Image: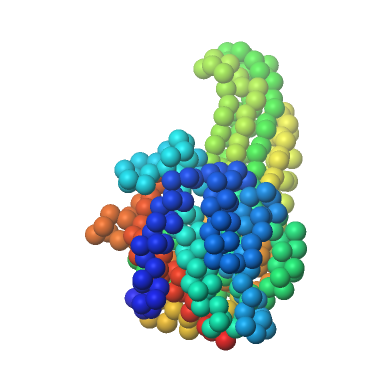
Amino acid sequence: MIKVEKVILDMKQHIVEVRRALHKIPEPGLQENETTDFIIEYLKSLGIEVSRGVSGTGAIGYLKGTEGGKTIAYRADIDALSVDEHTGVEYCSTKQGYMHACGHDGHTATLLGFAHYAAKHQKDIKNNLLFIFQPAEEGPGGAEAIVNAGILKKYNVDYIFGMHIYPEVEEGVAACRPGAMMAQTGEFDIAIKGRSAHGAMPHKGSDALLTAAAMVTALNTVVSRNVDPLEPAVLTIGKMESGERRNIIAGEAVLEGTVRAFNHETYTAVRNRLISTVKHLPESFECTGELVIRDMYPAVTNDEKLFEIFKMAVGEDNLEVIKPMTISEDFSYYQKVVPGLFFMLGSRNSEKGYIHPLHSNQFNFNEDILLTGIQIFDNIRKQFE
């Protein structure tokens, strides 16, 4: 276990109260107004320079170091999910239909706790610290707006770090890897248009449902036949809608899916094959196909030098080097601008029942890990001084 200093352990009751206050007020992306007000007032009470986020929600806090040779940024995401909470805790969500089911309240409380610690020990901190409380990680991607607004450049950020609570790793263990850690992702919609007819006279129609079925089969060969088998990639169709009645040839069909890859060239290859298939396959069924692709977050790729620094910060015995994951994170936008590292903080505790996955309406965690997170952030800071 990562050793937590007494001065941080003594913050437990306060940080737990902060986390629970945030947990009660979950808000969706770009609507995190109460959460933002809470963060801003908290940072102001510490004497930290703070400004409202570039998208109207979120906040940027800045603490000048005694020497100011470098600026180290830390990011926490603040938005919640449209999930009805079923944890039964006394600090349950007060906003019907919304819940912090992805641990963002924990991320925010951890970074506020670190800001609290840093403000109280400012005379001992050499480098500048930037606290980024980012909206809309779950969508549409608040990190990109912060990067495009030049926030990292404005504060001359040298490195950036981010953390995510993760129930697939044992409680208190830091999980990370150098290089590609999370996938680049995209979403697509396919609209197939045919010609409706009576089911007893199929020759008079153009079957959009049959075309959609062939499309699913064809697209499921893209990764196996068009991608280097040593390069991971995913093309998944998760939704298909078509048809009106059992005895009618379907005139329309809609498919929805996702593409994921760690390598940009691989992602592009899958994307191009998707475009080609939707353009040409429907023609053989006398139908037409229309494709809309939304390229989402780039791949999270951890800087290898920062990974070695992180290993020293947490201790090799407390580090689990995990396999790449095909989930996505908009922290990747920061890594396009400055060297960055994203890590997971394990929260799985079977004895206490903290076993539910991210986005579950029963997701929760042992609040002791908030202190571990604060300690890791401070250990990272020390590596640069």
The quadrant of the rendering that contains the C terminus is bottom right
Q: Position of residue 121 (x, y in %)?
A: 51, 78
Number of numbered discs:
0
Q: Which image quadrant: the N terminus?
A: bottom left
Please state which of residues 283 and 279 is positioned toward the viewer in this rendering: 279
Give me the residue at 60% from left, 19% from top: 249
Instruction: Look at the picture and state if 377 lies above or below 291.
Output: below
230 is higher (above) or lower (below) than 78: below
Q: Is residue 385 left or right of residue 335?
A: left
- Picture layout, residue 128 above or below residue 102: below
Res 369 visible: no
Residue 130 occupies quadrant: bottom right
Q: Is residue 327 above or below residue 71?
A: above
Q: Quadrant of residue 321?
A: bottom left
Whole-percent x, y for residue 369 in the image: 38, 65
**Residue 281 location in percent, x, y?**
69, 38
Q: Position of residue 320 (x, y in %)?
A: 42, 73
Q: How is the image coloured?
A: rainbow
Task: Name the one closer to the observer, 277 or 75.
Answer: 75
Q: Nearer the viewer, residue 165 or 190?
A: 165
Q: Which residue appears at 62% of the width and 32% of the height?
A: 254
Q: Is residue 286 left or right of residue 366?
A: right
Residue sitting at 49 percent across and 55 percent down?
A: 104
Q: Is residue 92 visible?
A: yes
User: Residue at the spot x=63%, y=68% of the render?
Assistant: 62
Q: Nearer the viewer, residue 315 or 367?
A: 367
